[in-house]
Image: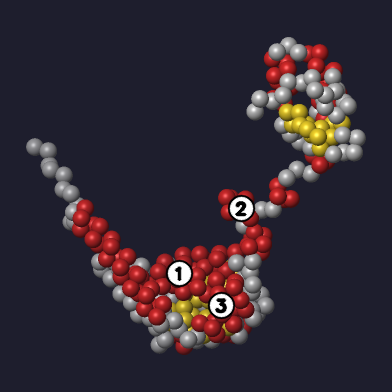
Amino acid sequence: MEAKKIKLTKSTAFERLRFARDVIKQEFEALQRLYENMPVEFNQAVDIILECPSNLVVSGIGKAGWIAQKLSATFASTGTPSIFLHPSEAMHGDLGRVRPTDVILILSNSGETTEVLQMLPTFKRQENQIIAMTGGERNTLANNATCVLNYGQSREACALGLAPSTSTALMLAMGDALALVVADAKDFSSVDFAKFHPGGSLGRKLTSVRETMRTLAECRVANQAETIRQAYTRCSRLERRTGAIMIVDANQVLCGLFTDSDLARLLEKGRDEVLDQPIGGNDQEPDPN
């Protein structure tokens, strides 16, 4: 007899949703506590970053490392030069990326992560200013920091209370607040933002018309007295082809357009004789669109 397959899950669909809500609620409550008890050192951290003459180096390992990478990207995109430093790679040569003028932002919930602590002697020797983002004030990282951003102790939201979840939510929120307050203090504008976001839909929204439109030299332009055949023969030499020829008068004022669709309609109807008439004349059939 074939063995019956055992369903490994211990919960019903309802129980799963209830647990999901509990996770969100626990993280929300931790964020609410942070909202009501922002560390007084926050302004000091902002000033340290504002006065940094070089890079903000953001570091962390494990889940905190992924948050650190995100925060470094956020700082960089909002006007604060920033790099991410992986603690393990730092001990194998990447500490050479760090200059004495750099500010170090380190994320560690416990403040006792071995890989993180191994970097501290180098930073201390170079006299780097260190901002510690951690879940307590009494740990090795905090003791060696210039400024401590303590978001408080909190239980992780997983059933075992172990997987970084609540702590990383707090790191992300605190880090975003820090990056955006620094950007605001720098009067970082939408124009500045556009410089660092040229790609994607966001880049298109922030791009000026001048940056996307063709220059006049790249457009097909014909005097209204030229024939259609002359205009197409001459304009075909352009490397960048457009879908229409701009018709101008003797004063170079735009007075109409002749599109490739207009040409196609003439050819479809066998009206080849029109090709030798002025492109700005009234003999062409108007575009019904």
Does 59 sit above or below residue 244? below
Does 77 sit above or below residue 267? below
Residue 72 in the image: x percent, y percent? 55, 68
**Residue depth check, mark 2 versus mark 3: number of the one nearer the observer:** 2
Label 1 sits on what residue type? Answer: Leu
Q: Nearer the viewer, residue 276 or 111?
A: 276
- Residue count near mark 1 (Cα–Cα under 10 Å), binned few <14, some 14–19, many ≥20: some
Q: Nearer the viewer, residue 97 or 192?
A: 192
Q: Earlier in the sequence, mark 2 or mark 3?
A: 3
Residue 172 numbered mark, or none? 1
- Residue count near mark 3 (Cα–Cα under 10 Å), binned few <14, some 14–19, many ≥20: many
- Is the N terminus in the top left, top right, bottom left or bottom right quadrant? top left
Residue 16 numbered mark, or none? none
Determine the residue positioned at 81% across, 34% down.
Answer: 255
Residue 104 numbered mark, or none? 3
Residue 202 in the image: x percent, y percent? 58, 54
Determine the residue positioned at 59% across, 82% down.
Answer: 47
The answer to whether marks 2 and 3 mark residues whose Cβ atoms lie closer than 8 Å is no
Residue 232 in the image: x percent, y percent? 81, 25
- Helix, strand or loop at mark 1: helix
